[in-house]
Amino acid sequence: MNRQASAFPFRSLLLATALLAVPAAGAAAQGMAPEAFPPAAVPPPEASNEPPLEPLAAPGDAPQAANATVPYEVTLTGVEDDGLSDTLEAASSLFGLREDPPPSILGLERRAAADRDRLQAALRSAGYYDARLDIAVDAESQPARVTVAVEPGPAYRFKTITLRNAEGTGLPGEPIDPAALGLRAGEQARAPQVISAQSDLLARLTGQGFGFAEVTDREVVVDHSDRTMDVAYTVKVGPRVRYGAVRVEGATDVDEDLIRGRLPWRTGDIHDPKQLDTARQRIAQLEVFDTVRVALAPEPGPDGVTPVIVTVAERKRRFLGLAATYSTADGIGGQAYWGHRNLFGGAEQFRVSVEVGRLAGESGSGNSDGERSSLDLPDLRFGVSFRKPDFLANRQSLLLNFQVASEQPPAYDLVGTTLSAGLERVVTEQLTLSYGVTSEASRILTTDRTYRTALIGAPVGLTWQGTDDLLNPTRGERASIELAPWFPAGGDSVSSFVSARLNGSVYHDISGDGRYVAAARVGFGSIIGASLDEIPPNHRFYAGGGGSVRGYAFQKAGPRDRADNPTGGRSLFEAGLELRIKVTESIGIVPFLDAGTVYDSTLPNLGQPLRFGAGLGLRYYTAFGPLRVDVGVPLNPDEDDDRWQLYLSLGQAF
């Protein structure tokens, strides 16, 4: 079987083989008949053994021109196992350096000679100890031809796996089956499995509370008489650790009790390394620290009761930000904000922000001859927010918000104020519950009517976050549901109504390494208790835009009035599909298809036509999340719809 060169990470393979060759803490194989696992300390393929200068020509050699090279082809024969072929090719400098040919036949022969040790080490690492290897160089061919002929022979297999403590007896705690570590008697004896099993063994012991366990000896013995391998790990287990006193270091302005309240254990509980990581994440979520470290003290305490050290570095308490935007439709815009991360010493977050938009841009408003009246104001939003973590209960936050806004989306012009107070409670690491009360008063203009509203709402929401990343998920799922009853409290508001919204998305890592990710989402919305005309326009559902049906302008994937302004609806259906392809580590492309619209009925009528949009996106992956550029086109547009839309944002579309 002939094989061509292919890329494969070989440094880890060499490291694994070398580690097996030198047992931990100087352990040596025992016995004369069995042979200790042989060393494989060979340099990686890119470390060429060729001399830096051209050697003197041997008698009979043709003279070489300056900067001349000897191109060659190399094939691997005798190996039917694709995995073994990939391993050998990755180990070989003949394959790895094909694009960098040597300056002479002598250099090629030296490269081939150096490959013998590499390939033998790779064969032993894969469990082949009786392999035969021959490398032939045909200098007469043009280009030169190198043949690597391998007879792997029978694979050696694991025979006995021993786990013991320093006294030679079994390990304490719950029994650990070697098969659970990836070492099963009768399976092919591969070096990387022996290395990974040692790490897995320690992880299982620390998971049982033995936080200071360490492998002091590893014996690997190969017996040629029956082609088997025996593996033995000797472990210094140490005491079963229980949590002792907690010492906080680095907290100068943040209340230490707030930090201690984020720890998921109680004094005296058995140590679990996952709890240390959970504590670190929960403390970091306070957003007042640059770094957080949670670890056991360096040495176990009496009877295993060991102190825990929490080390933090506080962020600057105050922050200031400025931003500017521009678009041909909306003109110039900007944002400024000031905030405090630790207002009263309990990680309270306070923020004041001002946003201005549509300066020197198109208004989109008009007169009664075809377009709605206009408030004749720029987009303006002034907001004040306050967040207090661990309010009345651990991991429950108090949220206070006040906002004054003037905004002119395509559907309406609005001037209004909103005041809200709520609680956000983390039920589990994935599930969050929020509830509260909101009051708002607004003046809203549409093509045919002016609304003066005063409403009080009591929104309740549940959010499930089961993905591996907030801004760039590659696997898992998300779901959210929000139920908001609204009651009239003045103005011309006369009808109560209830708004419900359900969203869900799933992510599947097709390739297993994040390079090919399939993503899908679906969303439903419904308003009951009032007709469309009785529902204020800012509480209706709309479709279209960068977070909805791409290819359509914001709010415009749905019915419109006589002035071509969106009317919104009492129900909503949306769906989307994406294939996220990473071309390089920092660049990706995303073909997508979206569908959706809004309906005047209480529930979505899927028998009515949907609006479809498709397009292609570009992603630039940064440390803080992907930068998104999407270009979408409507597949079944109305006459007045633009032919394409451009969307830019931070994070994926969903």
Image (cartoon, rainbow, N blue to C red):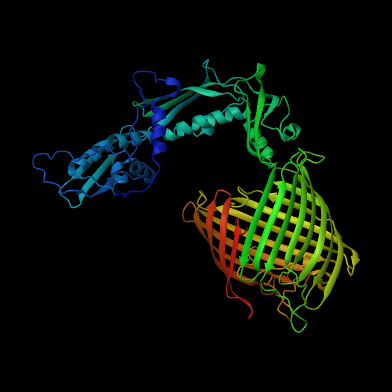
Between 101 and 53, the one lying in front of the other is 53
- In this picture, residue 49 sits left or right of residue 188: left
Quadrant location, the C terminus: bottom right
The residue furthest top is: 167
**Which residue appears at 31% of the width and 32% of the height?**
130
In the image, residue 113 sits, relative to residue 578, either above or below, namely: above
User: Above or below — where is 616 with respect to 399?
Assistant: below
| Percent position of residue 416, x then y | 81, 64
Q: Residue furthest bottom?
A: 369
Q: Is residue 413 above or below residue 393?
A: below
Q: Position of residue 111 (x, y in %)?
A: 25, 40
For the image shown, how many numbered marks are present on the structure? Answer: 0
Closest to the observer, 107 or 428: 107
User: In the picture provided, is 457 more to the left or to the right than 345?
Assistant: right
* x then y, percent, for residue 252: 70, 32
| Viewer-nearest residue: 610 or 628 | 628
